[in-house]
Image: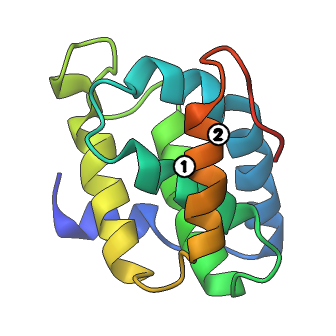
């Protein structure tokens, strides 16, 4: 995966695109996270990014970048199928790492507190959001 493709994936999009991505992320985030938990080395950051992306106080461009990255994470079909152990989420990790670098500083402490609470809850529980 090259930088141009990652850059294209992380385009924030207009309001309609952000709304589509937000709906996709809300629907699929928790089931995909459960599958990926052992393979994604930064699950806490990923969940905090989820809460940051859904936070109306987050700037629109930052929300757009995060929603684009999270939508890529939850896509059923991407560059490398996720069912391949370890390798399957490598492209998702690359996109998420680029997104985190682009929005550095916008994931606040309250997003991490919500992430910690969600990750501490029962594995089958899906936190609100």
Placement of 115 over or under 127, stated as above or below: below
Q: Which residue is mark 1?
A: 47
Evaluate whether residue 105 shows in this view. yes
Q: Which residue is mark 2?
A: 118
Report the front residue among 116 and 20: 116
Percent coordinates x, y for residue 124 in the rendering:
67, 14
| Cα distance between the residues tagged 1 and 2 | 8 Å
Identified at 45% across, 26% down, the residue is 77
Evaluate whether residue 12 shows in this view. no
Q: Are marks 1 and 2 in contact (CB under 8 Å)?
A: yes
Placement of 17 over or under 115, stated as above or below: below
Report the front residue among 20 and 40: 40
Element on which disc 1 rests: helix
Instruction: Answer with mark 1 or mark 2, whichever residue precedes in sequence.
Output: 1
Element on which disc 2 rests: helix
When asked about the image quadrant of residue 2, the answer is bottom left
Percent coordinates x, y for residue 15 in the rendering:
81, 74
When asked about the image quadrant of residue 108, the answer is bottom right
Identified at 17% across, 51% down, the residue is 1
């Amino acid at each position: 995966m090259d930088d141009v493709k990652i850059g294209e994936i992380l385009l924030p999009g207009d309001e309609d695109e952000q709304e589509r991505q937000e709906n996709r992320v809300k629907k699929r985030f928790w089931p995909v996270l459960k599958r990926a938990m052992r393979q994604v080395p930064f699950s806490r950051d990923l969940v905090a990014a989820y809460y940051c992306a859904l936070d109306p106080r987050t700037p629109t461009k930052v929300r757009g970048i995060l929603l684009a990255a999270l939508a890529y994470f939850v896509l059923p079909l991407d560059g490398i199928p996720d069912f391949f152990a370890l390798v399957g989420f490598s492209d998702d990790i690359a996109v998420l790492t680029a997104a985190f670098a682009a929005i550095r500083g916008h994931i606040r402490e309250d997003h991490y507190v919500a992430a910690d609470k969600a990750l501490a809850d029962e594995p089958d529980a899906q936190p609100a959001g």
